Amino acid sequence: MKYHNITTNGRLLTVLFSLLFLSQTMWAAIRMPRLFSDGMVLQRGMEVPVWGWSEPGQTVSVCLLPAEGKAKKKHVTYTATADATGKWQLRLPAMHPTGPLALQVSSGEVKVVINDVWVGDVWLCSGQSNIDTNIERVYPQYPEEIDHDSTTRVRLFKVENEAVLSGPNSHLLSSGWKTLSKKNAWRFSALGYFLGKQMEAKTGVVQGVIQCSWGGTPIESWIPRDSVARFDKMMADEALFYEDADMREAAKEANKLAADRWNKLLNQLDPGMSGIWTAPDFDDSQWERANQYRLPVGRLNGSFWMRQHIRIDATHAGQEALLLLGTLVDADFTYINGKLVGQTGYQYPPRRYNIPKGLLHEGDNVITVRFVNHGAAPQFVEEKPYLIRWNDNTTLPIGPEWLVHQGVSMPNQPSMPTGFQNMAAAAYNGMLFPLAPYAVAGMVWYQGESNTGRAKIYEAQLRSLMQDWRQQFQQPTLPFVIVQLANFMAPSPMPQETGWAELRESQRRAALSDPRAELAVAIDLGEANDIHPLRKRELAERVALAFDKLVFGKRVSLSPQPLSAETASDSTIVVTFDQPVTATQGFEITDATGPFRNVPCEADGSQVIIHGRGTRLRYAWKNNPIEADCRAKGSLLPATPFEISVTPPQALQSANRNGGTRSR
């Protein structure tokens, strides 16, 4: 971004003070959202809102110019007048893909120029931690691709976390637009990263991807407070209680003091700290032996220690390496030969700790893990990597057998509510609202893990979110792709009553009821032991396919959806899908009074024949339905989990009344 029409004379000190004064004056005259900055992408094919703030009554002019060095062409200037609050807004006409351009904004003698502007497609990815899951997290899944990725044709914009309870904010926090590279994308949404790449490959135009997400947030944080009140007045009123900034700061300070005191006392009382249990020559011969997946400790407030002796050969002694300790519950402090090599404050991130040069020596070495838990049992998550890897790709497995010892048990750490981001409208006010009405091609919504305990109202909440966001972005037909929750947790061979399955059904029905929404099914992309599955590239392919249909009008087949379930005979039910499928298991039925039970089936074209009788039928209705195998016959995309009524032939009604899909 450059400023023009600035002239200073005199000595260096005078120049610096003059520049500071003029900079402040210009921003008093023209102020724009952080979205409008160098490297930005404007949406093609629709009017593009441009807005900002100036002096009340001031006329602001906006025009798009060829980039420096390009041939000058005739340009059109668009104007707006700032209202009594200083806000101004205008719309640029629909444009074809092009760039680079310069966006010039001027008012009186002040002129601001935003450079490296492109016209292409813009996608907004929002939700909770599975949008947050970044390239660093998924890197081991796609190392070759990520290592060699670098393009200026995909631009990334990350909205930083900010919870606001006092009403919609006008500004947002961000470091601005960045071109796609391993370095720039390292902390960026992996789903957004792969979506941008795939859409650029499909369309050939520059892509802008905006990440606006916050791990752990419920849907109530992402909709206006009056919308939350329609579903949960108590939650909406709680946000009012914490509107006061002094109240919030006092709660934060009280929690900080409590945490500092708790940790100080923990370290004072923990025998492992005073006894230096991290030392390589510490005598651990009297410690209990235990398998890391069957630790002799339950729920714990306090610390728990583990040590393992490993042998390093002469070839790898002294070399740099990477320690992979899977995923642990909760916090850990991990040492090698008495030196702290890594620590993580909560359970979800993978433990990948660098071992510096010279730390490992030939012969006996000691890994020490100190767990610090707040109510959860210390745990090593199964089916994760536990090993040391050297730069030559040789590895040394970390065995499951450890020496273990109780540290210290502590009282609960007192706290006040300070998860303000989880309160009504907090993320909407602080992160989503300031983005609007930036023109976008479509929205990706991946959220719901935090709402599985109240899944029955989620359909209505999600419909409200889509309506609210379309209104704020001034796009009544704004497309949404809703990512359905992936499979997670231990599989069960028997039917389950689960909030995860109920929430998936709410997501399905919300998409079904909206002609400008589609569902990206992820029921086969999850991991039993990780709420943040790594296969984000494959998920992005499904999201991109949905946008092919919603935005570009392509005739594509998405995941199979049920049209109807009809009693065919005394012993069979026929489920009709919107496309040919294959299936052998995963279906359940019940009558009016009994529980659901598994039933055999086979596929015939676009129908699945269920061997059994009942009044309700459901498919893949479990936390982790790994046995469910209904897929599209051509694309092999998985069918969506669902529950629908079974109707007798003479009473078969429209698919929408039955919970079936709209015509595709």
Image (spheres, rainbow, N blue to C red):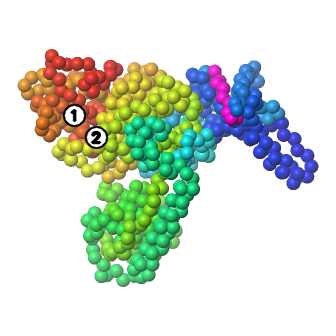
- Dot 2 falls on a residue whose secondary structure is helix
Q: Does residue 150 sit above or below 292 in this rendering? A: above
Q: Residue at x 27, y 25 (%)?
A: 660
| The quarter of the displayed image where residue 405 is located | bottom left
Residue 542 position within the rendered picture, expressed as x and y whole percent measured from the top left? 39, 33
Residue 128 position within the rendered picture, expressed as x and y whole percent measured from the top left? 44, 45
Report the magenta residues as a range.
85-93
Kindly indicate whether the residue at mark 2 contacts the one at mark 1 (C-beta within 8 angstroms): yes
- Dot 1 falls on a residue whose secondary structure is strand
What secondary structure is the magenta-colored segment mainly? strand
- The residue type indicated by label 2 comes to Ala
Say if residue 620 shows up in the picture. Answer: yes
Residue 501: mark in rendering: 2
Q: Does residue 61 sit above or below 435 in this rendering? A: above
Left or right of 162 on screen, residue 141: left
Residue 618: mark in rendering: 1
Q: Residue at x 33, y 58 (%)?
A: 381
| The quarter of the displayed image where residue 265 is located | bottom left
